[in-house]
Amino acid sequence: MMKRWIVENDVDKNKSYPQIVDAARFLQENEVVAFPTETVYGLGANAKSDEAVDKIFKAKGRPSDNPLIVHISNKQQLSELVNDVPEAAEKLISAYWPGPLTLIFHKKEGVLSEKVTAGLESVAIRMPDHPVALAIIEEAGLPIAAPSANRSGKPSPTAAQHVVDDLEGRIVGVVDGGETGVGVESTVVDCTGEVPVILRPGGVTREQLHEVVGQVAVDPSLKEGKGAPKSPGMKYTHYAPDAPVYLVDGTREDVQKLVDEKRAEGLKAGVLTTDEFVEEYRADVVLSVGRRDDLNTVAHGLYNALRTFNNSDVDIIFAEMFPEEGVGLAIMNRLQKAAGYRVIKA
Ligand code: AMP
Ligand code: MG
């Protein structure tokens, strides 16, 4: 049985918690431990140790060419990891750290395990905005490499139970701080060039980045998954439930028609919709992901909904689409990947 350290999600940073001290001790001993962040649960390990980082890749079944994000708890740690913080990065840090924003820098050589960066000369760093994550990193006194705490390819975990479901028997334990808030991962922004480039949309929106640094580019490969992405992880299938997902570019009537066709063939069909319309569909399983009039609720509920389909025996899932504005860009990116970029134009 893996350990489950239960903590309040608003731990006071001036107090010491035995659960956090215990979890941090395992990190210092090069074991892997999952913990909540404001985006999703992370699977943490000492980013300076090859042995520790190797355990992350093994536990997740993650391809070794997909680099990890290094999590820090204070700005001092940043200067240990990078030589130079460009002006745009400095502005983004002031505005959005701690928060769901990962920045890519040229790395200082010889500090981190080469396995963290998968041999790249750059390193991805973020400071999570979650008191439990910050307390664990601070207590461990180490930079912590932490990808999402799911088996590779599955939806990211937004509750400790998801971590247990995926990684029981593979890691020492999970710090249970309740449900995560944002629900989709951090925005990854490359700050090594002239203009900051979004490599992965996430919790901090393109509009928010633009407000702080003016010009921001978006990695062209994000569109329809074509071309070689600059962020190695973006090329892998991700977030997928067991049954195939199809995005439907059409009306609710179009979705219902597709469901009816599949059911006429004897298949069980699921629909992913929102609170507003969950009562309208006739299908084998109809799940709501949140409220369409507040896309933050959709980001928050997305992975749980995708996982919930695995508790049913649906053969096929039809999902509604969302506007690619604000956090909608990250939602659509994850849905596209969950669907393997299959879109039905009705
Ligand atoms: P995850 O750890 O699952 O949230 O995924 C981390 C994401 O950040 C993946 O898409 C990685 O490919 C990306 N990433 C990490 N380090 C780098 C880097 N040095 N350059 C570009 N992308 C990176
Ligand atoms: Mg992940």
Image (cartoon, grey):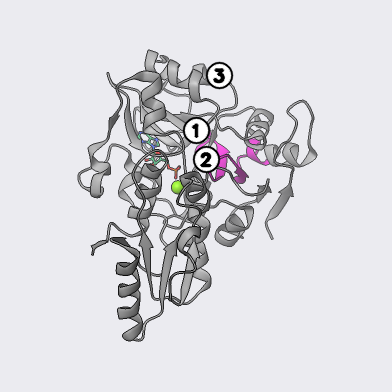
Which amino acid does the dot numbered 3 rest on? Lys
Q: Is residue 254 left or right of residue 151?
A: left
Name which residue type carries label 1: Val
Queried whether the magenta region covers residue 49, the answer comes back as: yes
Give me the C-alpha separation between circle 1 and circle 3: 13 Å
Write down the residue under mark 3.
Answer: 75
Q: Residue at x 34, y 79 (%)?
A: 260
Q: Please tell me which residue lies in front, 21 or 132.
A: 132
Q: Position of residue 72 (x, y in %)?
A: 56, 28
For label 2, the residue is: 146
Which disc number belongs to residue 50? none
The residue type indicated by label 2 comes to Ala
Residue labelled with disc 1: 70
Magenta part of the chain: 26-51
| The residue at label 2 has a CB less than 8 Å from ligand 1 | yes
In the rendered image, residue 11, in percent from the top left (x then y), is placed at: 73, 35
